[in-house]
Amino acid sequence: RVDISATVKKPTRTENTLVNMLESYGISPETAQIVADLAADALSEEDLANQEQLVAFFQEIIAGFIQVSPLDFTENQPQKRIAFVGPTGVGKTTTLAKLAALCIGKFRQTVALITIDTYRIAAVEQLKVYGEIMGLPVDVVLTPHQFKKAIDNHRDKDVILIDTAGRSPRDKMSIEELATFFAEDLGIEKHLVLSAGTRDLELIEAVSHFQKLNLDKTIFTKIDECTNLGVILNTQLSNPTPLSYITNGQRVPEDLLEIDRETVAKLVIPPTQGSAS
């Protein structure tokens, strides 16, 4: 019989150290092992001992794993219709307000707000307050028919932002109910909003269940409440949709990060102190 164990590459002491380092950032053991193997194969002993070189390599590898697709608000674009969906308590309404402020402040877009969050009166009132502050119309709809009518009423706007009630990923019926609002011909872009403070397994479960809505992009919120952000990488490796934005606080509109792959990689693996990277 062939001794299979003899043919399996055993991690070296250096690789184990690298894996432990990557896991300290919240990166899953499986992904940490892959990145550590790449580092051990590609870098010299001198580079591996250089913290700045090592961190820069990790950032480069992780940037290659991340997909990013921010919204394009350049002129002469067709009307954008963006819905924010996801579990309860992840910050959908606040994120919507941040994006609305970005649209009108930086890109000079005309914006309308629609909410189909009829489960929480407080959330509807919160959106109305944001609308009043920014001078934006806010429509509250209860049915898919009313939703289509509201969309049509705002056909002159550059952007329509749509708030939704938080749904438990395990509540299939409520997710299916939400799907009835998003008829394909309406061209709604669905952004799944997730909190970076949620456990990996729950995030992956949310991605799987909300994918029934044919998600387009993902937004991570509340990174300011986390000590490490490996969870973003872990989730995106099992998530077919790219990241559009990341939020890092409650302030509107300041705490909305416009991102690229390198920015996200540096959030997952922060530069070492004193590094210019």
Image (cartoon, rainbow, N blue to C red):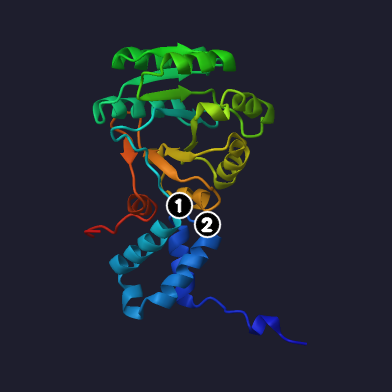
**Number of residues whose C-alpha sits closer than 10 Å to that of mark 2, classed few (under 14), some (14–19) or many (20 or more):** some
x then y, percent, for residue 145: 58, 14
Where residue 15 appears, as percent x and y from the top left, is: 47, 73
Left or right: where 145 falls relative to 93 = right
Q: Earlier in the sequence, mark 2 or mark 1?
A: 2
Numbered tag placed on residue 43 in the rendering: none
Q: Position of residue 45 (x, y in %)?
A: 36, 79
Give neighbour class at mark 1: few <14, some 14-19, many 20+ (Cα, 10 Å): many
Q: Is residue 53 above or below residue 151?
A: below
| Pointer 1 residue | 230
User: Disc 1 marks which amino acid?
Assistant: Gly
Say which residue label 2 marks.
28
In depth, the one of 92 and 150 nearer the eye is 150
Asked if 43 appears above or below 217 in the picture, the reply is: below
- Residue most toward the bottom? 1
Residue in view at x 48 percent, y 59 percent:
23
- The disc labelled 2 sits on which kind of residue? Ser
The image quadrant that residue 258 belongs to is top left
Q: Secondary structure at mark 2?
A: loop
Determine contact: label 2, label 1, CB under 8 Å.
yes
**Could you say where residue 112 lies in the image, as x and y percent from the top left?**
38, 18
What is the C-alpha distance between the residues marked 2 and 1?
A: 7 Å
Residue 15 in view of the camera: yes
